[in-house]
Structures are given as C-alpha cells and as structure tokens.
Amino acid sequence: MLRVEHLKIGELPPLTFVVPDGECLAVEGPSGSGKTRLLRAIADLDPARGQVFVDGAERCEMSAPRWRKLVRYVSAEPAWWTPTPRQSFPDNERALEKVERGMASLALPLKLLDRSLSQLSTGERQRLAVLRALIDEPRVLLLDEPTSALGPEHSGLVEELLRYQLISNCSAVLVSHDLGQIKRLADARLQLGPSRSMRPPPKGLQR
Amino acid sequence: MNPEMGYVNLDVWDLLLAAALILLNAAISLGLSLGLGRTLALSAVRMVVQLALVGYVLGWIFTQSSPLWTVLAATVMIAVAAYEIRARQERRLKGIGSYFLGLGTLLFVSTLITVYAVSTIIAPDPWYSPRYILPILGMILGNTMTGIALTLSTLSDATARERNAIEARLALGENRFTAMSDALRQAVRTGMLPVLNAMAASGIVSLPGMMTGQILAGLEPVEAAKYQIMIMFTIAGATSLGIVIAGCAAVLLLTDERHRLRLDRLESKA
C-alpha cells in the first residue's frame, strides 16, 4: 500500500492520497501540471517535502536504493546504458525465466535480448523497459506513459501484464493520456492542475 | 664535471637576440591580418615579467632556506593551480564545493607525492630544501591540475548527456556510484590520457623540458634521463591519484545523500 501525505510538488497544494494494494490510481492533468514530478518525488528521485509510506515505512527510514527497489519509477523515455537488453536484466536463472515469460506475454521475440539496443524499435524498447521494471517485484509501480510508443494491440498486452501485477498485490500510479487505458486500469483518479482546485479524492482512496 | 659541458651564462643581449625571433610572429600577424598584435605583445611581456619575477623570488627563497618561506611559496602555487582547475570548467559546480574540489585534492595529493619523492627518493640534505621541493611540486601540480580539470569537465559533460540513463539506473535501485560508473570511468580515462601520452612519447617526439634543462645545465644525458624517469613516475602517480579522488568527490557532489542526480548543482553552460 502506498500512502502519500502532504507531498509538496512545485506550486501545487500539498497532496495526500492512498493507493491500496492491488489498486491503480490514475493521475490526470494538462502538460506541465506536475504529473511526472509527482511520480519522481514518490520515487525519491527529486527532493520534495512531505511523507511517502510503503506498507507503513517512510522513505527516510531506509536507504534510497532500497526505497527504489520497493517503489519503481518507469520513465516516459526509458533509457538504456548497456549494448544489449540482456545486460540490463539481473543475471540469474530465476530472473531469466521471468524475463522469458514476460517477453512472451508482451509479444517480444527472445532473440531481441541479444540484439543491439540501437537496432530495437521505440516500441520494443518501451515494452522491454516495463519488463525491466517488474523483474525484481517492486511493491509500487509509478508508470509514466507506459504505452506512449505502442499501438492498441501491444498496449493491450502491457495492460494485461500490469493487471497481473495488480492482482498479485502491487499498487500502481499511472500517468496516461489514453482515457480508455485509464478506464480499463484505474480504480481511482487524481486530477492535477494549477487552474482547478483539487477534487476530493474519490471513493476508495480514503481508508 | 667536464669543463666543456659546463653551464653557459646568458646575458641581456642573448635574450634580446632571442626576442628578435618573436618579430617573426608579429610579421605573420601583420601579413595575414590576424589581429593578434596586441595579444602577442601582451603575452610576451607577461612571460618575461612572470619568469623574471619567479627567478628572483625563487633565488631569494633558496638563500633563505627556511621551511616557512618554502611552505608559503608552495601554498601560493597550490592555490593558483586550484583556481586554474575551476577556471577551466565550462560547467562548474555551484557554491563552495567547486573550490574545495580542486583545492582539497591538490593539497592532499601534491603534498603527499612531493614529500614522498623528495624525502625518500631524492633525499637531499636537508630534505625540505626549497631547491628540490618547489620545482618538483611545480611539475606535479602542473600535470595533476591538467588531469583533474579534464576529468571534471568530462564528468559533468558525460553526466549531463547520460542523464536519462543514470536516472534509469537510480530508479532501478542502483547506488550513485554504480549508476554513474560509466561517466566516471570515461572521465578518469580522459584525465589520464595526457600523462600516458607523455610517457609513451617522451624522448622520441620531444625531449622533456626538465631533461633539456639539466642537459643544458651541464648534466650527463644519462643522469638527466634518470631524473626524468623518476619525475615521470612521480607525475603519473600523482595525476592518477588526484584524478580518482577528484572524480569520486565530484560524483558525491553531483548527487546527494538520497542517491539523487543533482544536475541543478551545476552552473548552466556559459
């Protein structure tokens, strides 16, 4: 369970909300309203005042690398630093098995693992980045436009994979411009925006 | 010493004859209208004044042979080198950290290596004799300074360029040194290159300045070569130590205790 209390992002009023286990919160708002900044602040990639808890533990109670093993931010522009995708995945049998299963479910041929990253399409890199984020089983997923480079068919596969994570008790915060996707995945919605005042969190958010 | 190999004094006329050669530069600048006349004159005058001044100051310090004056001169040299490191950065770290990055590293490395080289390798009597300490320190500082400046500017450029990759690694739970290891490795390698090249090329492409000086001063070439070898190793050691310390310190300054990448701590490009 993710709990955010009085988190201060830029000019926005302090944000307080809860995302229970197995649920997905969609964050909406125009460009520049702070959606990405909110996700980065929750992952502790940017300094922000306020508290963030996962299963009752505040981020400051553990080291930042440990926190980011629990709270996984998936950037809208996934970056790679290795020559091939394989080197970016953990190198043990159990992880490899999960990678193979994940790749099959995302319609990615296994041989892509050893192909040079510059030869992969944007969509292939994006699907691999989502998979990379899931392998070590984080508790909370922060997804920034996870299907922006994908067509409807592959978006559906990614959504299926994410829904599976939710069923296995992850929580997720989703930023997406795809209203259909928000309808399909999100259990609650959060509207950000400088012009509009914050809506009270919808049902299911306050517990 | 062989009398034929003795030291030949230069008088003012000799220097004027040498200065005549700079008229060649002036003629080229005029002929090609390079507009370098002013800069040329200024640089030449600066060079003469600075070197003459250094000659007199060093001469005076050598006759004093007091550790106090030696330490003072060394401090000035280190401070100027530290300033130069900062001045050569296109993107500096904001705040006081950028001063301490160069100064602290140089202070530690150059003191350590100079004292080691002079007191245990050359071992003159007394070991703190400024005639040995100051020139060795100067050579170490010059090379370490270049190495550190190169390392720091490569590191900040690489970090800014690889920002997304570094943050992706941080987001996956890597610590700041692992996440920045590619940038750091690239920076350290770049900083080492001048010294590695100097070692490989010395004696074939160019005769190192110190060796030339000692030969002109009448020392046997083999003896001069031995000195040069010692100096090269000393410089290489000091440079690599300085680069690694400054590089790691810069990684710490470019990130924070929560392992966040803090590019906001870099000044924007001038």
Image (spheres, grey):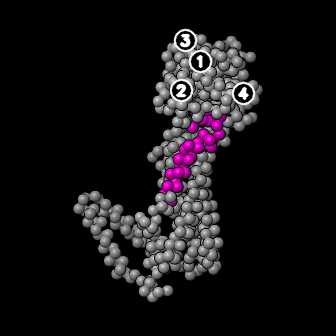
Please say whether residue B122 is visible from this viewpoint: yes
Instruction: Provide the residue designation for mark 3.
Output: A180
- Kindly check if marks 2 and 3 are in contact, taking CB atoms under 8 A apart as contact: no
CA gap, disc 4 to disc 2? Answer: 39 Å
Mark 3 belongs to chain: A
Q: Which-is-in-front pick, marks 4 and 2?
A: 2
Q: Which residue is mark 1?
A: A105
Question: Could you tell me if the residues under marks 2 and 1 are in contact, i.e. CB atoms within 8 Å?
Answer: no
What element does badge 2 sit on? helix
> Which mark sits nearer the N-terminus, 4 or 2?
4
Picture coordinates of residue A204, whole percent (x, y): 70, 13
Location of residue A15 by image quarter = top right
Q: Is residue B12 above or below residue B165?
A: below
- What residue type is disc 1 on? Ser
Q: Report how far apart the C-alphas of labels 1 and 3 lie in the structure.
A: 21 Å
Badge number at residue A53: 4
- Chain identifier of the residue bearing label 2 in the image: A
Which contiguous range is marked in magenta?
A: B166-195
Foreground disc of the pair 2, 3: 2
Q: Of marks 3 and 4, which one's residue comes earlier in the chain? A: 4
Q: Residue at x 75, y 29 (%)?
A: A57
- The reply to whether dot 3 and dot 4 touch (C-beta < 8 Å) is no
